[in-house]
Amino acid sequence: MAKYLRLLLVFALVLGVTAMTVTSQDVAREDTVIFDIDAASVGSPFNYNWFVPGTARNQGMHQVVWEPLFILNYETGEIQPWLGESMTPNESLDVWTLTLFEGITWQDGEAFNADDVIWTVNFLKDNAGYSGHGEIGPWVESVEKIDDLTVQFNLTGPNPRFQLDTFSVRIWGSVLIMPEHVFGDVEDMDTFTFYDPEQGWPFGTGPYTLTTNSETEWIYDRYDEYWGVDVHGLPEPLRVEFIITGAEDSKALLMADGQLDSAMDMSLGALEAILARNPNVIGWYDDLPFAWPDPCPRQLSVNHTIAPWDDPNMRHALSLIIDRNEVVDIAYEGTTIPSRSFFVDYGGLAPIIDNVEQISPEADVAAAQELIEAAGYEMNSDGFYEKDGEVLSLNIQASEDFIEKRRIANVIVEQFREAGIDATASVVAGPTWGTNKSLGEFEGIMDWDFCASVNEPWASFNQFSVNWLTPIGEETEGRTRNIMRWSGEAAEEYSAIVDEIGLLALDDPRVVELSIEAYNILLEEMPAIPITQAKKIVPFDTTYWVGWPTAEDNYNHPATWWNSTHQIIHNLRRADS
């Protein structure tokens, strides 16, 4: 904490300058909400065509401009209507009918209706390689317009999760509907950016429009002709800003001085330093652990096409070396827990987690070294394992955008080195990290790509399926699926079980039975190595705005980088009102 207090004093003069750059003069501070972006940079900051993989969405566009059809409420488990009024399946779960709210309009005045939904779905169905194709392509056989407000989805087979997985912000985002009257005329989708201020691009259906765009700052002003005033209400903030704050120290300075209302994530030490200067700042909890449990457990993935990590025993050796308690203590300052399974530790997944072998939080280095030595390695004079003249090494890539993952990498690298593996960590730019991960251009990488399941197991299981197996050098589906290139007889058997689970209703008792069977294959093969549960310290400043989500006022989760942020914006009220 002392470190951060010193930094607050050292950078006091800098803070005054920074505050001027993030707060415009024509809208009062008390009418402005300021969010930070937890990244060092935004790839393609002037590209608003979210279909193109790697294009940013959470610089404000999918929080305040692009609205989802539905929003999954993590606290209640309900799927709540947003643009969509309802979505219901037939008895066999292979036909779904979407009904839109009446009176929705795009910000350019055109009606938002079934034509937009049908164009978007058909584009994604017919065009592999674009974001959203993985949710639409394998499942939608055809889509029909019943009337201007009603769309029928004819699926390729029964899918009880179609609404949840595709349109309900289950994790981070959802398939977003784009305006047919603009995108339908695009000749080259790869180069189309949907950015032209003279034409009013980009736009959406939401209550804010983009008015200022730079590489580090995005300003959105309230759109008072918002279609949803009678349905969702008109948000109180007149302006919303999203800014890249840079290092955690800068973020802490801004929030301590009341110039940042929401921070995506930070360490406990930084939060304690802020609280010493600004007692109006709150977390999900009022005291330790302060953090909200993010649904994306942290893991180490290794490239199965690179020996010796194609050997399950060597992957097990890595897992056995990791002291997860130490990772929690050092990388998280005690604000999370070790992963006891591949899944996020939510109650909805307990019937599976509680009935499979648990991953130990403690290291067993001796058992790991037995596996390494059984593979033919011997310890050399430098304290590293060696075989045929080659030292056993592992390079782990971590994104510079995510402090937490860099800290995990640093801890486990030291653990690996002490056990005899010449491990190193490489910090790479966020966009490069994402591309390398998708293309398979890594040996080891810190990621969270089993992330998907919240209240049922299939979504996460599907992330590792051989259905998504892609050659090295080609992007994986969604840039997250089977990035480690897991293949072979066991992977095929696992994927067949997962496919069977995907056809069952969520409450079918066979879901748990088959899930345990699939999980045991995962545990045997260890295609990736679970490390910790993810906990996000997401502080909010109540100096200017109240109504933030908390464990006590849990109208939904506090992930302000998600497509569900619309709910938070609508819930905010001026502190002085």
Image (spheres, rainbow, N blue to C red):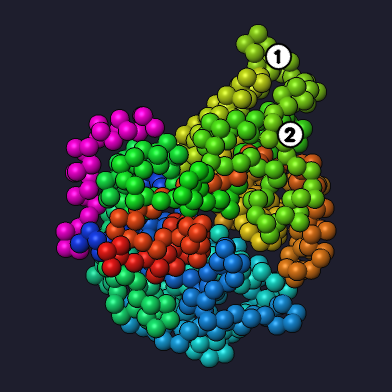
Residue receiving disc 2: 316
Q: Which amino acid does label 1 sit on?
A: Met
Residue appearing at x 70%, y 71% in the figure: 159
Identify the magenta region.
1-27
Q: How far apart are marks 2 and 1 (CA)?
A: 19 Å
Mark 1 lies on residue: 379
First of labels 2, 1 by sequence position: 2
Callout 1: few (<14), some (14-19), or many (20+) C-alpha neighbours within 10 Å? some
Q: At which x and y percent is residue 359?
A: 73, 39
User: Residue 275 colored magenta?
Assistant: no
Picture coordinates of residue 558, whole percent (x, y): 47, 57
Q: Is residue 10 magenta?
A: yes
Picture residue at 65% right of the left edge, 8% below the top:
381
Disc number for residue 475: none
The kind of residue on which mark 2 rests is His
Residue 489 picture location, percent across and down: 81, 47
